[in-house]
Image (cartoon, rainbow, N blue to C red):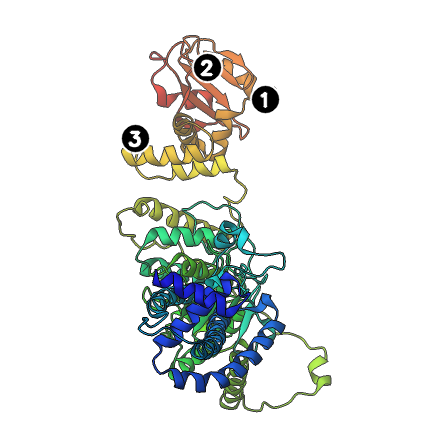
Amino acid sequence: MPGDRDESAATAESGDRDETGDRDESVATAQSGHAGDRSASESGHAADRNASQSGHAADRNAPQATARPADAAREALRAARREAVRAEAEAAGARRGRRAQARPVGSARPGAESRTTARVQAAHDMRQFLANAFRMPSVADAADTPEAVDDTGRDTTVGETDRSEPRPPAPAPPQVPATMATPHRDTVLRRTFAALPPRPDSPEDRGFAETWWGNAWVDALEQGALDVKRLVRGRGYADQGHVDAITVTPGQVLAYVRGSRPRPYRVQVRLRTLEDADWEQFLDAAADRPGHIAALLDKELPQSLADCGVPLLPGPRDLAPQCSCPDSGHPCKHAAALCYQTARLLDADPFVLLLLRGRGEKGLLDALSRRSAARAARAAQEGAPRSLPGVRAADALAPRRLPPLPSPLPVPPHPEQPPVYPAAPGGPDPFALDQLATDAAARAHALLATGRDPVGELTLWQDAVRLAAARPGSGLTATTRSLYATLAAATDRTPADLARAVAAWRQGGPEGLAVLEEPWDPPAGRFDRARPLLLAADLPAFRPWRNRLTHPGGHVQLRLGRDGLWYAYESEPGQDDWWPRGTPDLDPVGALTGLGTPDDL
């Protein structure tokens, strides 16, 4: 075939040229012929040859570890150009040799068909070579083709040429520093806070922050969020300590947040700064009350200062988060984590909020000091006291007789009535309030008239009995039952015990209550003379027991008090349920007159 004859002729002319060299020569010849003008190509290749040789020498000296994709592409183009120049030079020499030889008359033009086939193949190989030259190498390519790398680490298969070209190494994983903070750049208006440690597990229903202004920041975040699930994940990031050091500047909070990728995301939250008029209003409100300045120095933010008309705390739409992650949520979980950690910073130092609004701590304290000093000086000038006449120290310390005290005013004849207290739904009982006020007025009147309080020496139980006995009216009404239940519960007694004690108090006051509750052994004399007096009044013989004389029927009883008075009691026969009755009397028969006639007894 014509192609075989041309290949044999080329083999004979080139001598001991191997098969690989012939194929490279034909590829380069076809590429130069496809370019167009052969003479223009020969004139331009000389300069390219020198440039390519110098560039190739520099590339050989460069280490392979620093190769980049652009360098690999340029090296591939240079290699292709060098091969084309060399093939063109060898083809020109071969043509001159063939012209010197005689050709048979009438034979066809040699190599025409082979050059066309070689040109097509060369174009295909060059396109394939350039496509592979611009492709980024990967670890999978190196693992799949181990035979393409020789012992020196150079690729031997690129472009199917006899010259090895360096292949860029696989990109190494990014080296992430321990922290992205730059505290050395801090100024008055730039503060960097170290990464906060992880928080222990806390219940979801408890607030994230510990102060009211920190919780107000969290409320602004949560009310302006569009996705609650992102907030939950962001709070988890904050609790786990994924937020790096936080940098606070006027109008911005910046931090790097670790997510699912090795390199952290850059997150910033913007907040509008205050105008100068707002700051003037804030400084005036803080200087008006010294307590505000003291609270700020103690790292606290008074709520009255935050409500001075200046929007210190953000609203639901005031926080503007931005994150370098591909998530388009508002906010994403990384921005939510930064906002939650910022709330912890606000808990520790409210000046962080003031810095976000545009003023640093030092500038604010200096302005407050100047404003407070000016106000104090102005107040001293306006309210300076007038000079007073002086007094000699000897005169002031000299002994002197004090004038007598004025005589006291006359004691009112009786305590005044207290005002009427209206009833209110859910409020205290107006009758109980009226009773307490009346009792207090009576005690005050007695103290003013006699110099002593008769109630001050009573026990809790005695005072409760006194208050219940002072209740106007008789019988156990609904109001009385409520009062008795309250007083009995306060003294650990039952309402029945309190009712019996009230009857004894009404009978004889504190002595009557003592007769009810304290039996005692009276001395001989009056107690012994009581039985003959009762017999003389046609009454049966009463049975004695300590200070008590009991009727044989078991329904009447006389008790002798320490004040020498006899107190009458009644009970159901056989019940031993004694209740005070009648009026105390020095005569035992007179104490029984209120209970009926002797025949009834």
Q: How many marks?
A: 3
Labels 3 and 1 touching (C-beta < 8 A): no
Q: Is residue 585 visible?
A: yes
Horizontal and vertical percent position of residue 296: 52, 70
Q: Nearer the viewer, mark 2 or mark 1?
A: 1
Which amino acid lies under the numbered mark 3 shown in the image of this protein? Gly
Quote the CA–CA distance across marks 3 and 2: 33 Å
> Can you tell which mark lies on residue 522?
1
Quote the CA–CA distance across marks 2 and 1: 18 Å
Q: Nearer the viewer, mark 3 or mark 1?
A: 3
Residue bearing mark 3? 475
Q: Is residue 212 visible?
A: no
At 47% from the left and 50% from the top, the residue drawn is 446
> Can you tell which mark lies on residue 534?
2
Horizontal and vertical percent position of residue 585: 45, 27
At 45% from the left and 45% from the top, the residue drawn is 203
Mark 1 crowdedness (10 Å alpha carbons): few <14, some 14-19, many ≥20: some
Q: Work out whether mark 3 precedes mark 1 in sequence or the reverse, and give the earlier one.
A: 3
Quote the CA–CA distance across marks 3 and 1: 34 Å
Helix, strand or loop under label 3: loop
At 60% from the left and 76% from the top, the residue drawn is 57
Which amino acid lies under the numbered mark 2 shown in the image of this protein? Leu
Name the residue nearer the viewer: 91 or 152: 91
Mark 2 crowdedness (10 Å alpha carbons): few <14, some 14-19, many ≥20: some
